[in-house]
Amino acid sequence: MSRRPLGLGEHGEIEVTPQVKDETGKWKRAPYARSAQRWRARCSYRGHDGLIGELSRFAKTKRLATEALDKALTERQNAGVEMTSDTRLTEAGQQWLTQIKRTDSRLSAKTIEAYEGGFFRYVDVDGSSIRGLTLTQLNDPQRLKKFLQNVADKHGTASAKMAKSIVSGILRLAVENGVLPRNALREIRPVSAQVVKPTTRERDTTRALTREERDSLIAHADKLALSETISPSTRRKRQTVADLLAFMAGTGIRINEARSLRWEDVDLETGAVNVNGTKSKASRRSLTLPEWLLARFKVRADVCGTEGLVFPSPHHLNEPERRWDSSNSAKAVARVIGSSGFAWATPHTLRRTVATLLDQAGVPIARIADQLGHADPAMTARVYLGRDPKGDKSSVAQHL
C-alpha cells in the first residue's frame, strides 16, 4: 500500500539515531545508544514551495535532538503560512499592525498610532476576554459582543468603538487571507456604556484665551513643575507638560505634531522649526518661535540634550526616541489646563488662542492659516476665529 504524499508544510516520520566519530573524524551511526557522542533527528519535509527535502538537527541527547527538530519544523511552517484559523489573536493582531503600517494602507500616521495604542490598551492586555483566543474562537458574535460591552462599561463608548474597529480589521485580514469565511463583527450592532460617565466640567470650544490668560496658564504649569514635594520622575513629567503646553500656546501647533517634533528640526540660533504635519500636505510647514519660547527651548536643550524627540515619553529616562503615548500626553495637558482656573478650556483652546491673537494683531488670514497648517484659509476664519452676531458692534457703527 502506497503512502499518502506529503502535503505542503507536512513532514514524514521522524527518525532519531545515535552517532559517533570514526577514525577519520566523520560521523557515523553508533552501534549502541549508550556509545552515542551525539544524536541526529531527521525527517523528510515538503516546503510551501512544493519541494521535498530532508531536515536534520543534532544534539547531545535524544530528547534535545527531537526538540530541536520540532522547533525547526514549527519555524518552517510558520514561515510559509503566517496566518491560519488556529493563529492566536495576539499574533494575528501583530500581522495586522504590520499591514496597516504599509504605505498602501492609505492610513495617516495619527490613525496608525491610534490603532496600535488601542490594540495594546483594549485587546492585548491583561483582563481582555479575547486575548488568548484563536481566530476561529474569536469569530463568534456572542464572544465579540461581550468583549465590546466590557470595554464600553470600563472605558466608555468611544473606546468600544475603537476596539471594534481594531478587531474588525484583524478579522477582515483573516477573511482576505482565506482563513475565515466571514467577519462576525459585521453582525453586531454598536454598543454603548451601560452608565454614561458624568462630565466633570463645562467646556467651551468657541472661546480663546486672552494674552494675559495664556501667560497665566503657562505660569501655572511652571509652578506645578517646580513644586518641592514631588518626586524626580513626577517633576520630569510636569516639566515636559509645561514645555509642551508653552510650545502649543506659542505656535498653535497640534499636540500630535508637537509630540513628533525632533531636535534636528529645530534651529536654536534662528528659532526656525520644521513641522512634519500629521493631517495634510498643508500641515507640513516652517514656523518661527517667538523669543520667549526660543529661550525656553534653549533651556530644555541644555537639560535634556538635543538628540531624538523634543518631547519624548517622560516616563522613560534617557530614552529620547521613545514616543509619548498620545492619550497620556493629551490627558496630562488637559489636567494642567483644568487645574489652572480655566476649567472651560481644552488643549485645542491653545490653537484657537494663537489664531485669535494673530487676528487681533492684524495678521492676514492666509498667514494665520499657514501658521496653523490649514489648506483652506476660509476654514481658519470660519472655525478658529468664529463670528459674534450678538456681540457689541460699536466699533463697526463708527464706520457707517
Image: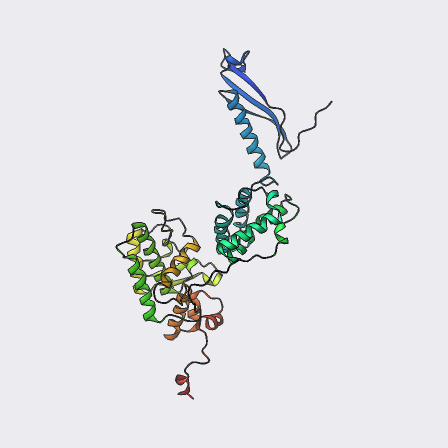
- Using the rendered view, name the quadrant where residue 300 is placed: bottom left
Quadrant including the N terminus: top right
Instruction: Tell me: residue 215, above or below residue 25.
Output: below
Towards the viewer: 186 or 283:
186
Give the image's coloring scheme.
rainbow
Residue 227 horizontal/vertical position (percent)? 27, 57
Residue 214 horizontal/vertical position (percent)? 34, 67
Q: Is residue 391 left or right of residue 53?
A: left
Towards the viewer: 226 or 215:
226
In the image, farthest residue toward the right: 1
Q: Residue at x 38, y 56 (%)?
A: 265
Q: Is residue 375 left or right of residue 6?
A: left
Q: Is residue 378 left or right of residue 188?
A: left
Residue 200 horizontal/vertical position (percent)? 42, 63
Visible in this render: residue 214?
yes
Instruction: Tell me: residue 359, above or below residue 89.
Output: below
